[in-house]
Image (spheres, grey):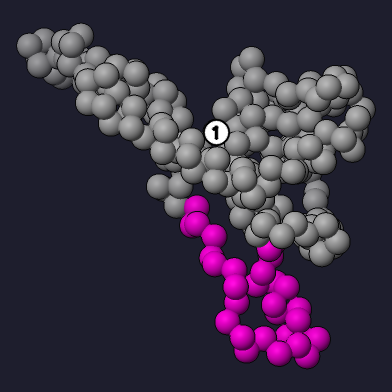
Amino acid sequence: MEEGGEIDDMESVLCVPEGHFQRNRNGAAAHIRRADMTVMAKYWMAFSQANIHPCSHVSDITVNKALFLYCVLRGMNINIGQVIANEIQTCASTMKNKAPLGHPSLITHLCELAGVNTATPPLERPRKAIDEAYYRKYCGEMRLQSIHRGQVATIEMIIGMYDTPPRRWWTMDEFNTVVAWPKEQAQASGAGAAEAPTMEEDDDDFEDAEEGEEEDSDDSMG
């Protein structure tokens, strides 16, 4: 991919304001940090990593995988079968000992069709379901949730302005209690402060399995 307009357009689709590609030593685009991605891009990133581009490295996304998300969000035609076939071929030729196997169910089914005995229980465990808890942990930033609560509360007050007695309107303290910025909640209850390190520890565990992926990407792009 050429630098310039294409990269800028990808950033405008995938990134929040001020978000951008991180660059390697040669100045080429290397990856986008998850924290710099929009909520919709994070959704598709999670779906892609679970079903199309198997990857346990969840803190950022490389250029090639970012290009896939860009095509999805732009509504472009994609040959998913070919994409998955390429992933399986790459997995077979460059498999790392500690990296999880991608597309285990599909590979098992293809082996069955080829006459391979698949009676032995599989070694791969099912991936974590992409449910509401997964979204809250990996896609829904705490500050984004705070902004959403504030928007909902504001709309409710506007709608009820004409039929709610003045004495029933929220005070500023009541409003701030509902939409408090995560840092304030963490200082008050300690819950937010305890949750953040846990998520980072999980990220570290995931990244250990794919720590060589970024280096390979940087070298190939350099």
Q: Quadrant of the C terminus?
A: top right
Rendering coords of residue 116 (x, y %): 76, 88
Can residue 174 be seen here? The reply is yes
Residue 202 in the figure: left or right of residue 100: left
Dot 1, how many residues are within 10 Å of its Cα: few (below 14), some (14-19), or many (20+)?
A: many
Does residue 201 lie above or below 115 as drawn?
above
Q: Nearer the viewer, residue 168 or 127?
A: 127
Rendering coords of residue 11 (x, y %): 72, 24
Residue 209 in the figure: left or right of residue 200: right
Q: Nearer the viewer, residue 162 or 71?
A: 71
Residue 93 in the figure: left or right of residue 125: right
Magenta segment's dominant SS is loop
Q: Nearer the viewer, residue 128 or 210?
A: 210
- On whether residue 118 falls in the magenta region, the answer is yes
Residue at 54%, 65% in the rendered image: 126
Residue at 78%, 59% in the rendered image: 95
- The span picked out in magenta is 101-130
Does residue 149 lie above or below 214 as drawn?
above
Residue at 70%, 21% in the rendered image: 20
Question: Which residue ends up furthest to the left in the rendered image?
Answer: 167
Question: Toward which corner of the image does residue 38 lie, by quadrant?
Answer: top right
- On whether residue 11 falls in the magenta region, the answer is no
Residue at 10%, 16% in the rendered image: 168
Q: Which residue is mark 1?
A: 39
Task: Assign a secondary structure to mark 1.
Answer: helix
Question: Toward which corner of the image does residue 146 lie, by quadrant?
Answer: top left
Residue 215 in the figure: left or right of residue 200: right
The amino acid marked with disc number 1 is Val
Does residue 43 lie above or below 100 as drawn?
above
Question: Toward which corner of the image does residue 44 lie, by quadrant?
Answer: top right
Q: Quadrant of the N terminus?
A: top right
Can residue 46 be seen here? The reply is no
